[in-house]
């Protein structure tokens, strides 16, 4: 869940814009010395990563230098040059609109990813909820360079590098976090006669940060796995394991128990907690008893596969008291009827693929009605409702700690604009069975397949029962002819020895043989 921290605020300025035609905002007489604004340009604390970015036809050059730590704030500065605007003819462009979470004009969409800590940091907001501590509307003229800036609070002091995730630009990995002076915006006005003023970090609300969750699902058995920084939960659907109102395992339960035991064996020895849950049908006392009996039945079945000497087991019962989702539909009640096996994962995942591990044997993939292709060419798709033609081309797939970072480029191969919109999304009720009205319109529907196991993109909880994907949330901006958009996707890392992955959107597209580098 997005966490609020209450560390002291820092009296420092970083960047924003104002309509004020007068002189730039004062900073209250605070000196621009250590930790304060410096002349525009990259900081001296480390290397600068520069790349060309196609943002809905606006051609940009974006340079990310070190993240600057000042007090309890970390400031991101991206020196950005507009090489050519989508309008052409030397026209100006509101560059900041490409990097907004709500399609407004503020630079509030960047996210900082801590792979080792399994956390994501969001741009700090102002206490009154009146906006972010970041660059506001900024109009660029072709050839003009200005800094896009955002402040993040709550990054632990021992974190010395983070990955910067940005719409259209992808992910800048391993950006150093250093103490230093925050680059200041230029004194001149932008093309709309606005002054890009420093914004005071003292205006920042408590930090917004969240643990990254990984969610996988076996498509052939009723088994779902959720990984958080604290623990791993393997959920077994009791409708597969038991008959109605029974605690006796069915003959068909063997396959699900075997699948869970296989995952636990791969994770290695350690204590397990087996917890029974029910829906809200029936009396509270009956549900409590039934949940314990079912947890005990699963525990007894696991003992024949995982000895207690290596996997000591504790049985627990929650009855109807901890529903995974509201008990307001038959589908939701089925999700709440479950037995959960919980354990702590050993964090021994390497940063790069293990080349000495035995290759993972290929497994048949489930059928699809979607367009199919292979890496490196990808697959070309005619989008519904005459929205254009896109070739989806896989880029690098890189293991980063416990995660896999995959780049997917959407390239317009037609002669008119193309809009992805809802082609890569989920339904408004997501795979977690949570309601998210934006889920259809981003990249949340892209998953990885390994045989009958589907891994969904990493997400994070912004409030209880409400997750957001670590992906592009809204893909409603048209890609011009011959233009492209880079989509960065994060997934749980595949098993050691995996050499290739399959990218899949159910019954829409599938790309096989994507190599892990």
Image (cartoon, grey):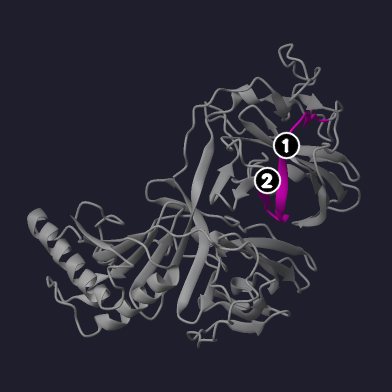
Point out the stretch of residues depicted in magenta. Answer: 161-185
- Name the residue located 56 percent from the left edge and 75 percent from the top edge: 504
Residue 49 belongs to the span the image colors magenta:
no
Residue linked to disc 2? 161
Q: Secondary structure at mark 2?
A: strand
Looking at the rendered image, the quarter that the C terminus falls into is bottom right
> Disc 1 versus disc 2: distance between alpha carbons?
9 Å
Q: Is residue 383 visible?
A: yes
Left or right: 148 in relation to 290: right
- Name the residue located 40 percent from the left edge and 57 percent from the top edge: 344
Question: Residue 97 versus residue 458: which sits nearer the camera?
Answer: 458
Q: Is residue 421 visible?
A: no
- Name the residue located 66 percent from the left edge and 39 percent from the top edge: 106
Classed neighbour count for the residue bearing mark 1: other residues with Cα under 10 Å, few (<14), some (14–19), many (≥20)? some
Looking at the rendered image, the quarter that the N terminus falls into is top left
- Place residue 413 in its image quadrant: bottom right
Q: Position of residue 12 (x, y in %)?
A: 69, 22
Q: Position of residue 492 (x, y in %)?
A: 53, 64
Q: Secondary structure at mark 1?
A: strand
The disc label shown at residue 178, or none: 1
The disc, 1 or 2, on the residue closer to the chain's N-terminal end is 2
Left or right: 192 in relation to 103: right
Q: Main secondary structure of the magenta part?
A: strand
- Name the residue located 26 percent from the left edge and 65 percent from the top edge: 339
């Amino acid at each position: 869940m997005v966490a609020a921290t209450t560390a002291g605020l820092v009296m420092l300025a970083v960047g924003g814009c104002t309509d004020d035609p007068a002189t730039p905002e004062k900073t209250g007489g605070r000196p621009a010395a250590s930790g304060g604004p410096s002349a525009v340009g990259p900081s001296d604390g480390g290397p600068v990563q520069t790349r060309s970015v196609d943002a809905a036809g606006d051609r940009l050059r974006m340079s990310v230098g070190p993240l600057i730590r000042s007090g309890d704030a970390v400031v991101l500065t991206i020196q950005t040059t507009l090489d050519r605007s989508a309008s052409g003819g030397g026209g100006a462009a509101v560059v900041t609109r490409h990097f907004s979470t709500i399609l407004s004009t503020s630079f509030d969409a960047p996210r900082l990813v801590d792979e080792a800590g399994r956390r994501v940091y969001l741009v700090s907001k102002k206490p009154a909820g009146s906006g972010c501590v970041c660059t506001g509307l900024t109009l660029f003229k072709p050839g003009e360079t200005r800094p896009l800036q955002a402040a993040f609070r709550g990054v632990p002091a021992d974190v010395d590098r983070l990955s910067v995730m940005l719409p259209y630009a992808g992910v800048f990995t391993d950006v150093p976090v250093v103490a230093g002076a925050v680059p200041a915006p230029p004194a001149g006005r932008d093309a709309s006669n606005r002054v890009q003023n420093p914004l005071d970090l003292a205006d920042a609300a408590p930090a917004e940060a969240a643990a990254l969750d990984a969610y996988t699902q076996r498509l052939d058995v009723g088994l779902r796995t959720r990984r958080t920084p604290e623990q791993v939960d393997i959920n077994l659907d009791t409708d597969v394991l038991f008959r109605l109102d029974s605690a006796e395992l069915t003959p068909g339960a063997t396959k699900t128990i075997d699948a869970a035991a296989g995952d636990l064996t791969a994770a290695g020895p350690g204590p397990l907690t087996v917890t029974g849950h029910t829906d809200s049908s029936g009396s509270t006392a009956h549900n409590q008893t039934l949940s314990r009996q079912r947890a005990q039945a699963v525990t007894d079945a696991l003992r024949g596969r995982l000895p207690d000497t290596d996997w000591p087991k504790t049985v627990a019962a929650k009855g109807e008291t901890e529903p995974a989702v509201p008990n307001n539909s038959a589908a939701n009640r089925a999700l709440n009827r479950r037995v959960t096996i919980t354990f702590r994962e050993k964090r021994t995942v390497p940063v790069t693929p293990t080349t000495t591990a035995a290759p993972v044997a290929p497994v048949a993939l489930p059928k699809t009605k979607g367009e199919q292709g292979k890496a490196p060419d990808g697959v070309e798709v005619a989008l519904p409702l005459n929205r254009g033609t896109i070739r989806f081309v896989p880029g690098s797939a890189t293991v980063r700690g416990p995660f896999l970072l995959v780049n997917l480029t959407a390239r317009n191969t037609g002669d008119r604009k193309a809009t992805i919109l809802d082609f890569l999304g989920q339904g408004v009720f997501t795979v977690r069975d949570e309601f998210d009205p934006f889920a259809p319109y981003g990249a949340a529907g892209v998953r990885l397949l390994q045989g009958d196991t589907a891994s969904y993109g990493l997400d994070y909880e912004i409030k209880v029962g409400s997750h957001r994907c670590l992906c592009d949330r809204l893909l409603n901006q048209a890609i011009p002819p011959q233009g492209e958009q880079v989509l960065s996707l994060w997934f749980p890392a595949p098993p050691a020895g995996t050499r290739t992955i399959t990218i899949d959107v159910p019954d829409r597209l599938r790309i096989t043989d994507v190599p892990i580098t």
